Amino acid sequence: MSGPQCCENPPTLNPASGQGHVEELGGLKSYVSGSSDSNLAIVLVSDVFGYEAPNLRKLADKVAAAGFYAVVPDFLGGEPYVPENAERPVTEWLKDHGTDKGYEDAKRIVEAVKGKGASAIGAAGFCWGGKVVVELAKTGAIGAAVLLHPSLVSVDDIEGMIIFTFGVKAPIAILGAEIDHRSPPELLKQFEEILAAKSEVDARVKIFPKVSHGWTVRYDVADEEAVKCAEEAHSDMLEWFAKFVK
């Protein structure tokens, strides 16, 4: 995570973006979109730039339009990573925003969403958020997982997801980039081999050509090709959740 690629193309954060609204959920400010009466919910776990990223909120709105209650919590406590702050490089920033804490917060979010009536919950994690979602899936807290250009996820993590200590087989899709130093194609192919060895596990690993780490939420909206690549990943994510979160 200390590599620069995770911090490239930072979004211009906008607390007013999106069609939904912000409310407190599980003790965290959260951007929510869609009807809370839906019994199907998706938690989107951001990258290091946090829950005010317009493209991420736009994706949450898309998830809501597909019939889910979409939740984007502020796991970073109002302190997203700021690349311009040379006095606090990402390695230092991570000391205060570790994925372990993100996982503990995420468990509370899942319980809060269940408290609103959700009977089936999926989670998608982007970069930093990918590790949080892996931890949720390991413990059976969610019914389906999607990792998009994840960081900090190891072979041991993927193996841990299929041990099923709790008897839960959470279907997992991993959407990766061809150009990614954090989760290079070689690592993703290892993940695929591990998952393929467990035929009872619903799993998919897809490597998108000619795209870089972060392409699903840090794309330039004026770049037609970048938007097209991001939307393909969004569609794959939604198809996964439509199939397994029900």
Image: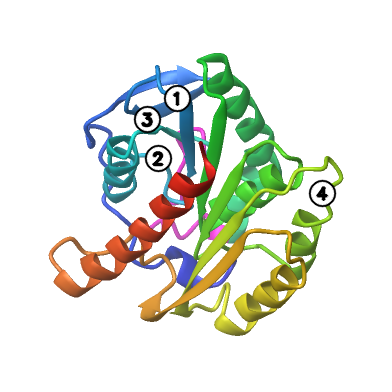
> Which residue is rendered at x = 54% and y = 78% of the image?
181
Which numbered disc flags the more N-terminal residue, 4 or 3?
A: 3
Pointers 1 and 3 in contact (CB under 8 A)? yes
> Which residue is rendered at x = 60% and y = 56% of the image?
172
The CA span between labels 2 and 1 is 9 Å
Regarding mark 3 in the picture, which secondary structure is present there? strand
Which numbered disc flags the more N-terminal residue, 4 or 1?
A: 1
Of the two numbered discs 1 and 3 in the rendering, the one whose residue sits closer to the viewer: 3
**Which residue is identified by label 2?**
51
Query: Badge 1: few (under 14), some or many (20 or more) residues near its Cα, within 10 Å?
Result: some
**Which residue is identified by label 1?**
29
Magenta region, main secondary structure: loop
Which numbered disc flags the more N-terminal residue, 2 or 3?
A: 3
The CA span between labels 1 and 3 is 7 Å
Regarding mark 1 in the picture, which secondary structure is present there? strand
**Which residue is identified by label 3?**
31
**Which residue is identified by label 4?**
164
The magenta segment is 76-90
